[in-house]
Image (spheres, rainbow, N blue to C red):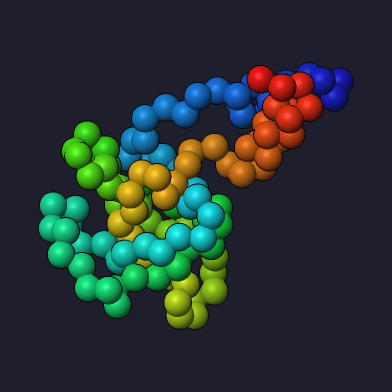
């Protein structure tokens, strides 16, 4: 019974990440400095317009410019209800590059990494 319950979780963690689309949930890769969003086409940001995302903070993708050379997304912060500076407040819209986020939740990644370490590639 345990195998039946864990098999989908394990298979999902080994599946390759698909393209990031609007409405998808992504997670911050470690602690990240994010810029408060302005339109993606306008890259002019002030250094003080940033906040910190905790590791594995959930974000909902609002806009994706992955097809462009710089590859940025605009996302809404969903987790971390602490509204103290320098952390990003909930529902803040931030601009991140693609290397700052991942799609698979950290729990699944941890299981996958453990299994890969045990059984090799």
Quick one: quadrant of the C terminus?
A: top right
Quick one: quadrant of the N terminus?
A: top right
Residue 1 left/right relative to 27: right
Image point 74% across, 34% down: which residue? 114
Q: Is residue 56 above or below residue 91?
A: above
Image point 13% across, 58% down: which residue? 42
Image point 30% across, 52% down: which residue? 74
Residue 3 left/right relative to 45: right
Closer to the camera, 72 or 116?
116
Residue 86 percent across, percent down from the top left:
45, 77
Closer to the camera, 46 or 90?
46
Image quadrant of residue 51?
A: bottom left
Residue 56 percent across, percent down from the top left:
55, 53
Q: Residue furthest bottom?
A: 84
Q: Is residue 56 above or below residue 92?
A: above
Q: Is residue 66 above or below residue 75?
A: above
Residue 87 percent across, percent down from the top left:
47, 72
Q: Residue furthest right?
A: 1
Q: Is residue 48 visible?
A: yes
Image quadrant of residue 66?
A: top left
Q: How many marks?
A: 0
Residue 102 percent across, percent down from the top left:
47, 42
Q: Is residue 62 visible?
A: no
Image point 20% across, 67% down: which residue? 45
């Amino acid at each position: 019974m345990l195998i039946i319950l864990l098999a989908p979780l394990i298979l999902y963690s080994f599946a390759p990440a698909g393209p990031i689309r609007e409405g998808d949930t992504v997670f911050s890769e470690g602690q990240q400095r994010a810029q408060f969003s302005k339109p993606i086409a306008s890259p002019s940001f002030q250094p003080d317009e940033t906040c910190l995302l905790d590791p594995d903070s959930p974000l909902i993708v609002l806009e994706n410019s992955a097809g462009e050379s710089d590859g940025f997304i605009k996302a809404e912060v969903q987790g971390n209800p602490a509204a103290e500076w320098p952390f990003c407040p909930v529902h803040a819209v931030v601009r991140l590059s693609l290397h700052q986020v991942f799609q698979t939740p950290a729990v699944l990644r941890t299981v996958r990494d453990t299994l890969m370490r045990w059984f090799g590639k």
